[in-house]
Image: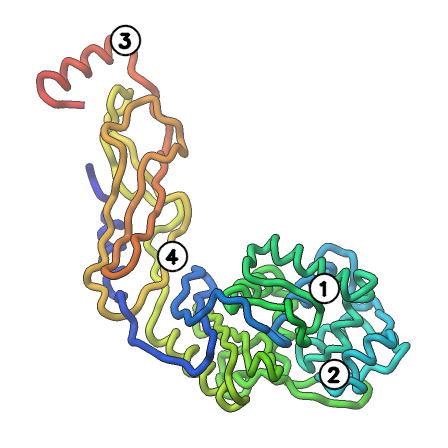
Amino acid sequence: MKFYKSLFYAVLLSTVAGVNAGAIETKAKNAIVMDYDTGEYLYTKDAFAPVPPASMSKLMTIYILFSKIKDGSLSLEDTFTVSENAWRKGGAASGSSTMFLPIGDKVTVEDLIKGILIQSGNDACITVAENIAGTEEDFALMMNETAAELGLKNSHFENSTGLPSPDHKMSVEDLAKLAQAIIRDFPEFYPIFSQKSFTYHNITQGNRNPLLYSMSDADGLKTGHTEEAGFGLTASAKRGNRRIIGVMNGMTSNKERSEEAEKLMNWAFREFDNYKVFKQYERVVAVPVYMGVEDEIDLVAGNEEIFTLPRNEAKSAKLTAVYKKPIKAPIVQGEKLGEVRLEVEGNSPRIIPLYADHSVEKRGFGGRILANLSRLLFGGK
């Protein structure tokens, strides 16, 4: 078995990261910090429990709206009509977060997006829901279907706004996954999340995301607050080539929300980094072939393999190639023939599949006899 030099370089690279990052605590009742690119969870605190998400659940409303624009069903210039229901339940009459939409107003989809993301308008959400699905109840069914498609296992929607409802719940893990999906699927719309103010009908309101004002690299996503839920934030920040997503819920004040969010996000950037172990199709190891027209075959990584690891304490990081013995011909290109185990003390092993670099045919009858004889007499291939 022959390791290529790149594998040893990968081991050395991995060892600059550590196993246990510096411990951190948060006053949030529920929290998760996730690396955007790798999906690795860097910190969790009761992250999988369904809890009231308040206005953070508007991210699902906006995901559906973005999807309709992307598939051509809607355009930014289309207009939606504001119903009396939207005005009463989510407008100025309700005393809740509002875009101040008048009954009967025809609002462009673009303005409604800004009204939801910047002003957190409940009236804007209900207007979107009713114009897309007919009723808010039917729109909630769409939200639940979309959640299932995105693999959000601890979410259930009763409305488009996040206003209190007994069965309207999301886990902070699901919110992190939803944020990741929005950034990934709709990069053309994502800059709206960082817009700090929006004016509609001569009423200017500021973006409620506190990190936009305290962290220069923060650029989204959504706050939430009700008496039941407490103060929450789904946030993202990009520093260099790394993006971190953090979700916190159940805090006691806007000040606490701002401080805890900034603390967790800065901690994630400071304590962790991403390490490229293999490039796509990179040769990892050459292994013997039995009964083949070639004596050896290269096993390659099928994809680019990047892992998020702590920056310190990682001298125990180790890469080990594991494969079938012997690898018997015929071999088909792309056939999975082994794996590399990336092991860091205190963590579960990360598994990287290895595939045949090319096909290898079986030897003819005479060649098979010689191979068997060699193996019997000399232990050869």
Label 2 to label 4: alpha-carbon separation: 42 Å
Q: CA distance from mark 1 to mark 2?
A: 18 Å
Q: Are marks 3 and 4 in contact (CB under 8 Å)?
A: no
Tell me the residue that label 3 is attached to: 365
Neighbor class of circle 4 (other Cα within 10 Å; few <14, some 14-19, many 20+) is: some
Mark number displayed over residue 98: 2
Q: Nearer the viewer, mark 1 or mark 2?
A: 2
Mark found first going from the N terminus, 1 or 4: 1
Q: Mark 2 or mark 3, which has the lower sequence index? A: 2
Q: Earlier in the sequence, mark 2 or mark 4?
A: 2
Q: Is residue 50 visible?
A: yes
Residue denoted by label 1: 65
Q: Is residue 114 left or right of residue 235?
A: right
Residue 306 - label: 4
Above or below for 149 versus 186: above
Instruction: Indicate the secondary structure of the residue bearing disc 4.
Output: strand
Amino acid type of the residue tagged 2 in the rendering: Thr
Q: Amino acid at mark 1?
A: Leu
Please tell me which residue is depicted at 72% across the width and 64% down the height of the picture: 65
Please tell me whether mark 2 sits on a helix, a strand or a loop: loop
Distance from label 3 to label 4 (Cα)? Answer: 44 Å
Left or right: 5 with respect to 210? left
The reply to whether residue 13 is visible in this rendering is: no
Disc 3/disc 1 C-alpha distance (Å): 64 Å
Q: Secondary structure at mark 3?
A: helix
Crowd band around label 2 with a 10 angstrom C-alpha radius: few (<14), some (14–19), many (20+): many
* Between marks 2 and 3 in the image, the one whose residue lies nearer the viewer: 2
